[in-house]
Amino acid sequence: MMQQSGKVRKLDNDFTRRREIELNNSRVTAVLSNRRKKRALVISAIFLFFASIFIVQIVRAKVNYADVHVRIAREQKSLKQQKADQKQLKTQVAQLNDKNYVEQIIRDRYYYTKPGETVYSFPNKSPKDVNNYDVK
């Protein structure tokens, strides 16, 4: 097979045929290589897309986890304070059920006296406000 283009002719011998087959094979290999590269690029892009979605979900879960722990700590602190307040209120209720304690409060705050007693007020000791009910 001889091809002729203009004044140049292609030799038709064993070497040129092998060389042409090698060139065709290298072209096919190059085309396949490009297809494989494109396919690998698409697969990598898909993998990165899903990996980024999973990473975002993991980060959100960690943020929510930390937020829940902060809320738990805050609520435990609030619960502890409320239990302390409840304990103090129970103590006050128990004291108010004691006749001697109630009598002492009435005498100190409202200046009640028993018959025949006299109340003296000292200048260094300021009277407690009647509306300020601090039980200690």
Image: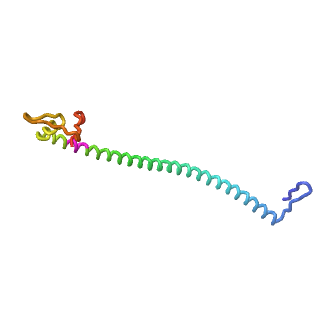
Q: Which residue is drawn at 65% across and 55% down?
A: 37
On screen, residue 25 versus residue 75, left or right, reads: right
Report the span colored magenta. 85-90
Q: In this view, does 117 lie above or below 26?
A: above
> Camera-side residue: 117 or 106?
117
Which residue, as the protein is rendered here, is positioned at the far bottom?
15
Q: Position of residue 34 (x, y in %)?
A: 68, 55
Q: Which residue is drawn at 11% across and 39% down?
A: 99
Which residue, as the protein is rendered here, is positioned at the far front?
123
User: Which picture quadrant has residue 85?
Assistant: top left
On screen, residue 71 versus residue 30, left or right, reads: left
On screen, residue 94 versus residue 7, left or right, reads: left
Dominant SS of magenta comes to: helix
Specify whether residue 30 is painted magenta. no
Q: Which residue is drawn at 29% across and 45% down?
A: 81
> Camera-side residue: 108 or 40?
108
Quarter of the image where the N terminus is located: bottom right
> Camera-side residue: 33 or 105?
105
> Camera-side residue: 55 or 65?
65
Q: Where is residue 63 in the image (x, y as percent from the top left)?
A: 45, 48
User: Which picture quadrant has residue 95?
Assistant: top left
Q: Which residue is drawn at 88% across and 59% down?
A: 9
Q: Position of residue 123 (x, y in %)?
A: 22, 39
Q: Where is residue 44 in the image (x, y as percent from the top left)?
A: 59, 53
Quarter of the image where the C terminus is located: top left
Which residue, as the protein is rendered here, is positioned at the far right?
7
Q: Is residue 129 above or below residue 65?
A: above
Q: How many labels does the image show?
A: 0
On screen, residue 54 versus residue 25, left or right, reads: left
